[in-house]
Image (tube, helix red, strand yellow):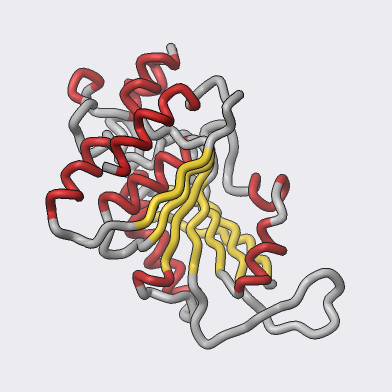
């Protein structure tokens, strides 16, 4: 695999941002890893959690080894503390993550696939929320999303979290959050009635997770429905 640390200017956010990118590379004799190159690479957009940044995947996981085996490109963008949302008082992070990052990657790395069936998104905690939001709001572009300890019921999470000042900066109206385009459960319900393609969803959460596990059984049931 080739590992790239990419610093770029975001026109959407109006500031310099960073992302880490893994690209498949054909290798021979590399100890512990077999590299598989191709004319076109399926791509995983991998989103970090609230207390992390884009570097956490390379520092704390074996993502490079897993991706090399599959011949998978992995894009790990910095999303700041945004919940991947066009913020009420801040940047347009949903536009940044859904439009600008893919466009830049296709420009910088032309072998990254633009086919729906080869485009995936996943994330941890806040990133799991962002991953499901991308797939549910843009099902014509993402065929699969995974949430690892993801915030699936944002309304319940915000009420329980206790740090209202953070969320008042992020979401436009806390009183109308339920049923809005930021509410995954509402977005999933509208998608089910739309006739659009449905992405496959995978949600995982440990039973000892104190932040989000209590919301998972009900949220997963609603998303499945």
Q: Position of residue 94 (x, y in %)?
A: 33, 46
| Along the line of sight, the residue nearer the viewer: 204 or 98 | 204
Q: Position of residue 83 (x, y in %)?
A: 40, 36
At x 46% / y 22%, what residue is drawn? 214
The residue at the far top in this view is: 162
Residue 74 quadrant: bottom right
Number of on-image labels = 0
Q: In the drawing, does residue 68 fall left or right of residue 170?
A: right
At x 72% / y 63%, what residue is drawn? 65
Q: In the drawing, does residue 205 fall left or right of residue 33?
A: left
Q: Position of residue 193 (x, y in %)?
A: 13, 49
Q: Position of residue 174 (x, y in %)?
A: 25, 20
Please identify the quadrant where the C terminus is shown. Answer: top left
| Along the line of sight, the residue nearer the viewer: 94 or 69 | 69
At x 33% / y 53%, what residue is drawn? 135
The residue at the far left in this view is: 194
At x 70% / y 49%, what residue is drawn? 61
Q: In the drawing, does residue 23 fall left or right of residue 81?
A: right
Q: In the displayed structure, would residue 28 be above or below residue 150?
A: below
Please identify the quadrant where the N terminus is shown. Answer: bottom right
The residue at the far bottom in this view is: 39
Q: In the displayed structure, would residue 190 be above or below residue 51?
A: below
Q: In the displayed structure, would residue 73 be above or below residue 100?
A: below
């Amino acid at each position: 695999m080739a590992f790239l640390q990419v610093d770029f200017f975001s026109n959407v956010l109006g500031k310099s941002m960073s992302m880490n990118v893994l690209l498949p590379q054909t290798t021979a004799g590399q100890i512990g890893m077999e590299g598989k190159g191709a004319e076109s690479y399926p791509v995983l957009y991998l989103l970090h959690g609230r207390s992390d940044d884009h570097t956490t995947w390379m520092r704390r996981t074996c993502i490079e080894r897993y991706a090399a085996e599959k011949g998978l490109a992995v894009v790990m963008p910095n999303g700041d503390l945004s919940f991947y949302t066009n913020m009420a008082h801040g940047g347009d992070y949903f536009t940044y993550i859904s439009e600008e990052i893919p466009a830049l990657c296709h420009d910088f790395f032309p072998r990254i696939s633009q086919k729906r069936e080869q485009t995936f998104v996943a994330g941890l905690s806040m990133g799991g929320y962002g991953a499901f939001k991308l797939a549910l709001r843009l099902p014509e572009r993402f065929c699969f999303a995974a949430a690892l300890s993801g915030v699936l019921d944002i309304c319940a999470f915000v009420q329980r979290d206790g740090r209202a000042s953070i969320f008042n900066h992020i979401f436009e109206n806390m009183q109308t959050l339920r049923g809005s385009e930021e509410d995954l459960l509402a977005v999933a319900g509208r998608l089910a009635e739309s006739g659009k393609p449905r992405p496959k969803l995978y949600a995982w959460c440990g039973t000892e997770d104190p932040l989000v596990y209590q919301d998972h059984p009900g949220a997963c049931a609603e998303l499945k429905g």
